[in-house]
Image (tube, rainbow, N blue to C red):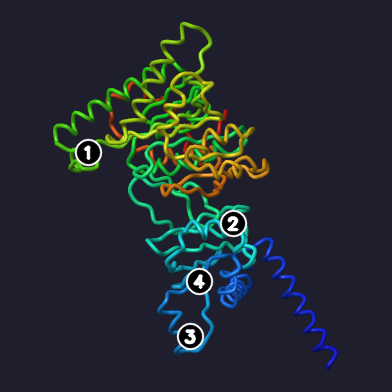
Amino acid sequence: MTDLSTVLETTGALAGVGGLGYAKVRAPRVYWSLVGLPVTWGRFSFTYRSTMDVCGLTVQPSRLRAFLARNIAHTEVQPVPPKVRHVRGTSTGLRVTLRLPAGLEPADLVAASERLRHAWGVHSVTVTETKPGHVELRMTGYDVLRRVRMPRRTHVEGLSVPVALREDGTAFVRDYRQIPMALTLGANNSGKSVYQRNLIEGLAKLPVALVGIDCKRGVEHSAYAARLSALATTPDDSASLLDVLVAEMESRFDLLSLHGVSDMWDLPSGSRPVPVIVLVDEVAELFLISSRKDEERRERIVTALIRLAQMARAVGIYLEVCGQRFGSELGRGATMLRAQLTGRVVHRVNDKQTAEMGLADVAPDAVLTASLIPAERPGTAVATDSTGGWTKIRTPHTTRAEAAAVCREFAHLVPDLPALAPYRPHVPASAPVSGPSLVKPFPVTD
């Protein structure tokens, strides 16, 4: 009997260890909730003061505190670390809110984030300023970008679309009210097209007008024709369509002037025009020319894009520009247009110079990270945010058919814009689904 109980206990222990090992590889959220979170929370609680001290994140106490420690408590004067205000566990990591003492700033914790990561044995540590004097340490217990699972609840409102997962486990939200113009760069098979699919899938559900410019004969955007208000598939059509958008912008400015406001969102809801989002698939095709006779068309396109990028935000026209490379070698006006595109998302690139084109002027510290994105991780990118910082993101895989199905489902949301009607793409009628015949056959008899 004793031998049997020993065997059962040993078998149960081995099964438990094997189950945890399986969960660590196949179900990291489960493993983190059962094992990783308690261990990390305990390690953080017991080593917090010493870790902050050795990482140089303490300051000398105030004179009053030093006097009380020497004369009242009769203890040695200790350096003061940031005060822990709140600790909260999540399914992906640990959130710690800190109150910074006088003499420390969020940049000090950002510089020490790599040391904190190793000290507490977590996958990554991200520092976010929540309000003056307070920061939040977002510790991620495992590599959440290995298998992308978007959060179930993401608070979005207005013109906001969650398109990717950040390395701290939160959703990367594309907010057109905060960042109206954006540039997405990436080499072939880097996940740039998948990023755009997720963006279109989210925008298709919003009451906006989508305008596609795809000079690859529409091979990318033609699948979303049911939800597009306009589509240009050649450089000549793109030039004409951009002229129409500039005219629409000017008419909207007349509307703002008539109501005495400077922003479209200050208009009464009944008079407010629908937002327009222009999706450019490969911006280099709009700049490159094959002969001198195309120079005039190129100037029209570049001038229209720059005008839209500079002024169209106030009237609700936004640019989403994609490309493999966007440098001065494209010709006059390229760098001027790039400077107007505030948001930057850089996927895997073929050279460091391309990463510098997208990130050096907004987040120079992120250039090296973007240059080291591995090819076996498509969809991984470096994205800047509205606070001036940057983060690593990865887009969940969405097929072209899935995005097209969403566009067909929400085709009724296409707004009525007479100026864009001539450029509305043709939507082929869906073929009837084969089914059983409703005609009753009659036997043929002599």
Q: Residue furthest right?
A: 3
Q: Which label belongs to residue 272?
A: 1
* Image quadrant in which the N terminus is located: bottom right
Q: Between disc 4 and disc 1, whose residue precedes?
A: 4
Q: Residues within 10 Å of mark 1 (few under 14, many from 20)?
A: some
Element marked by disc 4: loop
Rendering coords of residue 416 (x, y %): 28, 31
Q: Which residue is mark 2?
A: 144
Residue type at mark 4 is Pro
| Position above or below: 239 against 14 | above
Q: How much space separates mark 4 and mark 2, taking CA atoms?
A: 29 Å
Q: Which residue is mark 3?
A: 70
Q: Between disc 1 and disc 2, whose residue precedes?
A: 2
Rendering coords of residue 213 (x, y %): 44, 26
Q: How much space separates mark 2 and mark 3, taking CA atoms?
A: 47 Å
Mark 3 or mark 1: which is in front? 3
Q: Are marks 3 and 4 in contact (CB under 8 Å)?
A: no
Q: Which residue is mark 4?
A: 81
Residue type at mark 1 is Arg
Name the foreground residue: 429 vs 216. 216
Q: Residues within 10 Å of mark 2 (few under 14, many from 20)?
A: many
